[in-house]
Structures are given as structure tokens and as C-alpha cells.
Amino acid sequence: MSSTSPTKRTSAPTRTSPATAGKTPRSELSTIEEGQGHDQIVRLDPDLIVRDDFNARTSDTGPNDDLKASVAELGVQDAISVRPRPDGTYGAFKGWRRAQAQQTVNATARAEGRPVRKIPAIVRADLVGNDAMTHLLSLIENHHREPMHDRDRLKAIETLALLDVNEEERKQMARALKIKRAELRAAREAARLDDSQLRRATVQGFDLMQMAELAEVSDVPGAVKALEEAHTKDAAEDGGGHGHWDHAMARLRQTKADTEARQSALSELEKAGVPLLPDYFPWGTKDTSRPLTDLRTPLGAPLTEDKHRYCSGHTARLDEESKPVWHCSDPAKYGHKLRPGAKAAKQSMSEPEKEERARTIAGNKAWKAARTVREESVKRLCTAKALPEAVRQFALRTVMSPPWMYAKWCEKGETESVARFLGVPDPNADDEVRYSRETGPFDELVTRHGKAKGWHQVFAQVAAAFEYSMREPKTWQGLDRHQAAYLLCLKEAGHRLSDVEELALAKYLPQADAEPQTDAESPDLGLAA
């Protein structure tokens, strides 16, 4: 910091040329804040400011929403440059967009009975009549102004999110930046994107929350493209929303989790020195391996992993969940017996069988990913102010004529899913409370909110029962009519069905109502590569 004293502020009026003396509206000039000569900064009424005829900027001259949001919260912080006009107004040759933003904000403030702001300005009386220099200065201002780099903006927002400020200040920062408070927190994750990903996300119009989610799955091949396509589809729909995005994120998260689980399993097998069997053998090559569940010891005892681990044929395959299935590579060679009733060893799969198997695995994974999005939609419905009539009617029909899965689920007495959908604590989270309770687990909740939220509570229970009945990944291959009605109910209430959900519903819909299943026809069912 400099050791010199700061410039003394003065209240002297702005200097004007003889040609304009007496025409400057002195009542609108407030205390001069800093500088000398033509660098004096004053506070002007924005309504007295117009665009200077020699302002070099002729396109995009209006303020955008971001600028107006910032000015609404903080006012204009950087002084504009103006020169006096004969009619008592001021021509802005630098900062005309900022002036218009303040004019718009002031108009709203007046209409709502709130105070209005003046605008800091440098009054260049020396430029009156000097149109050439005015135009040159305006051109330099616009020509040399570089937009902030996307990463700089992201880092700046991240820094704001980490500052120790109170909640009201944090809200003001978010409003000034025209972003949600959650986006302030998301900036830290979004900053993990590399420059290429950040540039593409910015061009696509991703908000900070979406950038943070992209960063979460950025190491999944094809993630950027998948989310770009989902974002475009959401933007093209009349109702808006983010259903396509949610499903794309669920698939990418599933792919990421599967990859990490497989890598972890392979690492454990390598550490233990257990060879991994190939999933497929070439056509005509015999696979002599058998899972240990098909084998017995010479004395007829079950052959467990602990007993078999020292066999030279001790190997493994990974199942769909990347869990090891223990095998012996050649039971006959290493003296193991088949258990009575063990099925004959299946020979190598044909190409059509491999394709069908791949499609089944992809469908199972897609169904598992779709459930996470579906349950979020259920939670939004259960916590909304009002429940759609179609949802209420579905809940009523289910309770009055309970299908088998609803009746079976009620016998379980499970409360965790219902509580999660309603956004309340699980009343049975504590086992001591569970077994000592003399009243129903949700009696207190019904008493407190039953009048206003009764149908929400009923639907939460109905949805929990249906979700439990569809928990198995293979459900998509054999959806029954009650489960189909549940999915259609959610669709009518605004839930965006995934490709695999649409595929599961296809047999219950008239051909004209069925949506094209272009993604679902392929083995990956829309999953990222």
C-alpha cells in the first residue's frame, strides 16, 4: 500500500465549456467522489442519460438479464463516461448498457415503492463538440474489452462460495450473479472440468449445477456428448424440465460405478493371485470350467471358496455386479466331482446368443439406473403442495382394490421408503422404537399433516410398494399390468420415462401410442459406451 495520503475529495462542480455553461443540470450532480479535471466522478440521475450519437457500439446495445440482475442487487459499480448535451441530458459514449440497466431497475423500484439509485459517471465536458475523439474513445473501450474466460468466471464464483459470509450476503451474491445458491456451492465441482469440457458446456448453456454433474462423470467415455444430447432434448420439449438430463446422468453414474466396481474386483483378484476366466471362448473351443456350486469334494462335501483356494484350477468370473463367482478351471483334471443334479456344461455361445446376453445385461443396468430417477420423481410428487388428480385416483384404486404386490408389501411393515418419499425421518430407524411402539409408525405424522397431506402419504405408501415390486433388474422383461399402470400414472404426472421403461410398457400400449424405441433396440439401451 502506498504511504502517500489519499487524494482529498472535493465538492467543486464539474468544469464545463463556455458553450454549455448554465445548461448542465447542476441539481443532478452530487458530491464529486474522486479525481480532478475531466476525471471527476459524479452521481447522475439515470433518466438524464441517453446514448451518445457517436457511441461506437451499434449492436447488442441493450443490457442482458445478467447485467440487470447484477445492477438490481449492487447498482452500477464502475463509472460510465458521458458528455453534456445542449438539452440538459448526457450522452453516454462508454457504459450505455450499464446506464440502461439502471434505468430499467429504477423503473421497477419506483413501481414497487422502493428507493432508486443514481449512477456514477465521468462527465467529459471537454469533449463537447469533439465528436471524433468521443467516437475514438468509445471504439477503444469496446475494442479492447475482452470477455472473462469461462474458467476465470468459474474460479471467481468458487472463491465467492468459499468466503466466510452470512446467509443473507450469500443470497445477495447469488441474485447479483443471477444464479441459484446451490450453484455457488456447485462451482467448486464444476471447476474440475478441463478447458475443452468447460468450453463445450458453456456453449451448450449448461448451468453450474449441470457443469458440476458433468464433472462428476467426466471420466466416463462419451459423457459430454450424452449430456449435450440430453440437454438439447430437454430444451426442445414444450414442457421444459430436465427428464432427459436426469436419465442420462443416472446411466453415466451407473456406468462409472460399474467401471469402478470392476476395477476394484480385478485388483482384488490380482492381489490374491486368482486368474480371471474369459466370459466367452471361441466357437468350437470347450470351456472346461465349472462354478464351485456345481462341484463336490471326493467325499461329497460342498466345495467352498475357502476349501478350493489352494487348488491349481482356482479361478473366477465376474457377474453383472462385478462380484467374483468362484470356478475350477478343469474339475476332472483336479479331481472334483459334480454334485447330483448339476446341469450339463453349456458350450460356447453363438453370436446371436452373445448379442441377446449383452442386450439383457444392458437392459438390466438401464432399469437399475432408471429407478433412481423414478424415485426422485415420486419424492417430488410426495413433497409438492398439491397432488395431481391422476396420482390421487391411482392411489385410491390401489388401496380399494389392492394388487398382489401391494398386499404383500404391506405385510413387510417397511417404513424407510415411505419416509424417504415424504421427506421425513424414518420412524423405525431405531430398532428399540420399532419393537416398543404401541401405535402405528406414522400415526404422529398423520395426526399433524393428514388433513392437508393425507393423499400424499397414501401415495407414498403405494409408490413404495410398487418400487419394491420392481426392484429386480430383470423386471423390464416382464412388467405386469399393475406395474405398467404405475409407470403410466407417473408419466401422466410429468415423469420422463427412460428408454427401457418405454420398452417395458410397449406391450400394454396401442401401437399408435408407443414411442419409437431407437435407443432401446440397440444392446446398450442408451447407456454410455
Image (cartoon, rainbow, N blue to C red):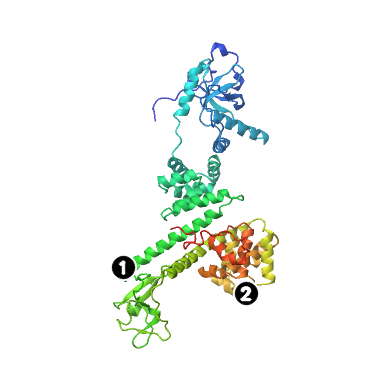
- Tell me the kind of residue under disc 1: Lys
Give coordinates of residue 250: x percent, y percent: 50, 58
Question: Mark 2 and mark 1: span between their CA atoms?
Answer: 47 Å
Q: Residue furthest top?
A: 18
* Residue 153, horizontal then vertical, whole percent: 46, 41
* Spot occupied by residue 196 in the image (x, y as percentages of width and height): 41, 45
Q: Quadrant of the C terminus?
A: bottom left
Of residue 529 and residue 182, the one placed in the foreground of this image is 529
Depth order, front residue of 73/226: 226
Position above or below: 357 against 256 = below
For mark 2, what is the residue?
404
Residue drawn at (41%, 55%) of the image: 221
The residue beneath circle 1 is: 271
Other-residue count near label 1 (Cα within 10 Å), few / some / many at <14 / 14–19 / ≥20? few
Which amino acid, by three-letter code, is at mark 2?
Trp
Left or right, residue 114 beside residue 248: right
Say whether marks 2 and 1 touch (CB < 8 Å). Answer: no
| Residue occupying the far bottom of the picture | 299
Res 61 quadrant in image: top right
* Residue at left offset 55%, top offset 37%: 70
State which quarter of the image contains the N terminus.
top left
* Residue 486 position (above or below residue 108): below
